[in-house]
């Protein structure tokens, strides 16, 4: 039998699921979701896996959200699995265009 888990702190580190709901403003157009302050993970909207995000590796900073997933009549659910460190104020942003302009550079020294 496993002992009950008691969190040691209010840390945002480590794997964790974050959930929320949002309402669209009466439209369900295609959109893009951005992850300000998040590290690395997966996102689902209404149970549909949009994919993996890893903003520091780039160049893709947003994920495509097909309009047919978004409901204009009921609340939409969002689930984010953060694998490393969540921001202190976790949120996602919906944009009207993708952000693809970030790159990550490294050298062979970084691989040691």
Image (spheres, helix red, strand yellow):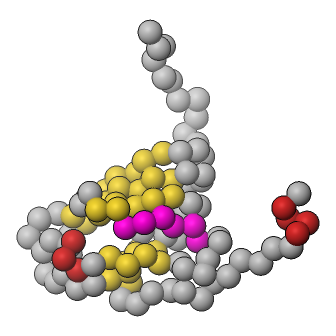
Image quadrant where residue 51 sits:
bottom left
Residue 85 spot, x, y in % from top left: 59, 53
Indicate whether 4 appears above or below 35.
Answer: above
Residue 55 appears in the figure: yes
Q: Quadrant of residue 69?
A: bottom left
Residue 54 among magenta residues: yes
**Segment tinted magenta in the rendering:** 50-55
**Residue 31 part of the magenta segment:** no
> Along the horizontal axis of the image, is 50 left or right of 39?
left
Residue 91 visible to the viewer: no
Quarter holding the C terminus is bottom right
Q: Residue drawn 40% across and 51% down? A: 18
> Residue shown at 54%/55% (left/top)?
86
Q: Residue furthest top?
A: 1
Determine the image quadrant of residue 104. Answer: bottom right
Residue 21 is situated, as x and y percent measured from the top left of the image, at 26, 60
Quadrant in which the N terminus is drawn: top left
Front-most of 7 and 64?
A: 64
Q: Residue at x 91, y 66 (%)?
A: 109
Question: Along the line of sight, which residue is nearer the eye, 2 or 107?
Answer: 107
48 relative to 101 in the view: left or right: left
Given residues 111 and 72, the one toward you in this image is 111
Residue 56's x, y, as percent? 65, 70
Q: Position of residue 107 (x, y in %)?
A: 86, 73
Residue ID at (58%, 71%) = 55
């Amino acid at each position: 039998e496993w002992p009950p888990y008691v969190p040691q702190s209010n840390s945002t580190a480590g794997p964790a699921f974050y959930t929320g709901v949002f309402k669209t403003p009466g439209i369900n157009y295609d959109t893009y979701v951005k992850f300000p302050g998040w590290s690395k993970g997966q996102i689902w909207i209404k149970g549909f896996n949009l994919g993996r995000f890893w903003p520091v590796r780039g160049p893709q900073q947003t994920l495509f959200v097909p309009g047919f997933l978004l409901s204009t009549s009921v609340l939409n659910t969002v689930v984010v699995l953060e694998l490393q460190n969540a921001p202190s104020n976790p949120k996602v942003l919906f944009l009207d265009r993708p952000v693809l302009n970030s790159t990550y550079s490294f050298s062979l020294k970084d691989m040691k």
